[in-house]
Amino acid sequence: MTEIYGLLLITYYVFTVGFMFFLYYKNGLSHPIEEQTGVETPPSALTYSELSVLLYNKIIPSVFICTVIDLISKNFFIVEKTDKEYYLIPANITYKGLTNSEKYVLEMLSRIRDDKGSLSLTQIFNYCDSKKNKDGFSIDYGVWKKIARKEVTKKFYEEKKFYNAVNIIVFIGVVFLIINLLFGLNTIAGFILIIPIAALPQYFNMLNKRTKESNIEYNKWLCFKDYLEKTSSFSLSRTDTFKYLSYGIILDVESLSNKIFKTDFIKYLHKALCKCISAIGIK
C-alpha cells in the first residue's frame, strides 16, 4: 500500500505544479499589447482610487494622501504659514460635488481642528502618529478605505477561472493527508502535503489578470510615469500642478514635488503623512 500511496502522491504533486502553471496562464499572464510611447499627459481621467486599483488592485495609502492634497487644490482649505508652522484654514464648508470618501476625509480632519477651526501640520502629524493615536487613525483610515474601494465601479480585472478546480485539488490533498495519518503510513511526502494544501488557495488569490483594455491603459500610465521621472521641470496650471503631483505619488515617482512646487508645504505634508501611515504599518 505504501508504494501505491507514494505513486499517487507523486502524481498529485506533478499535477498540482502543472496546474499552477496553467492557472498563471489563465489568470495571471497579461494580454499582449503594442508598446506605448510618448505619453506626456494623464492617459485618462481616472480618480486616484481608480488608478490605485488599476495599478495595484487595491487602495494604497497614497490615495488618502492625494485626497488631502486634492481638497487643498479644490480650495476647501487655504494654506497659511507662520514662522514655525503651516496651517490649513477651512475655506469651503459645502460638500457639494465631493465623493463620499472625500467627505469622510474632511470629517476626519474636522475632529482635530483647534478652537479657531484651523488645522496645523503638527496636528495632522499627531493625529496619524502611531504612538499618540494609533487606534484612532487606523480605525478612521480603515473606514475611509472601504468607502474609497466601493467608489471604484470600473472593471479592470477579468473574473478568475477554475476556482472550483482549486477546491477539488485541495480536497484531494486533504484526503491523502488523512490517509497518511489514519493508516500509519507516516511518509514525509504525505506530511509535505500541508504545503500545497495551504499554498494553492493563496496562489490563486494572488493571481490577477487585467482585461485587454485595462492592460493597454495600464501601460499608458506606466509611460506617463516614465515621462514624469525623466522630465526635469514642468510648466503647469495650478489645477494641473496638483493633479500631476497626486498622480505621481500614486505612480510612485520620486521627488516629483521638487520639480513642480515652489512651496515647501506639499512636500512637508506628503512626507509627514507617508511617515505616519508607514509607522502604523498600513499597506
Image (tube, rainbow, N blue to C red):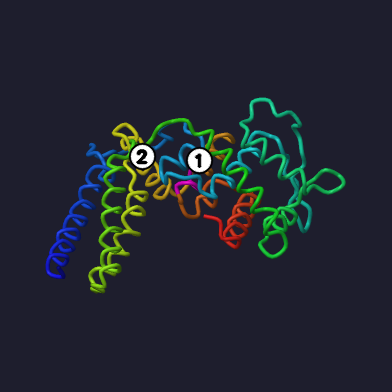
Pick the residue in front: 23 or 86.
23
In the image, residue 187 above or below residue 269: below
Query: Residue at image x 40%, y 32%?
Result: 155
Query: Residue at image x 34%, y 36%?
Result: 159
What's the distance in space between the residues labelled 2 and 1, CA to CA? 17 Å
Location of residue 150 in the rendering, given as x and y in whole percent from the top left corner: 53, 35
- On whether residue 248 falls in the magenta region, the answer is yes
In the image, residue 71 above or below residue 56: above
- On whether residue 29 falls in the magenta region, the answer is no
Disc on res. 233: none
| Label 2 SS | helix
Q: Is residue 63 left or right of residue 2?
A: right
Q: Is residue 3 left or right of residue 142?
A: left
Tell me the quarter of the image containing the N terminus.
bottom left
Residue at the outermost top position: 96
Pick the residue in front: 222 or 133.
133
Q: Which residue is mark 1?
A: 244
Q: Which residue is mark 2?
A: 218
The disc labelled 2 sits on which kind of residue? Answer: Tyr
Query: Residue at image x 35%, y 38%?
Result: 220
Q: Categorize mark 1 by other alpha carbons within 10 Å: few (<14), some (14-19), many (20+).
A: some
Location of residue 167 in the rendering, given as x and y in whole percent from the top left corner: 31, 48
Pick the residue in front: 272 or 58.
58
Task: Look at the image and give the residue range highlighted in magenta.
Answer: 247-251
Mark 2 or 1: in front is 2
Residue at the outermost front position: 183
Q: Quadrant of residue 242?
A: top right
The disc labelled 1 sits on which kind of residue? Answer: Tyr
Query: Residue at image x 62%, y 59%?
Result: 276
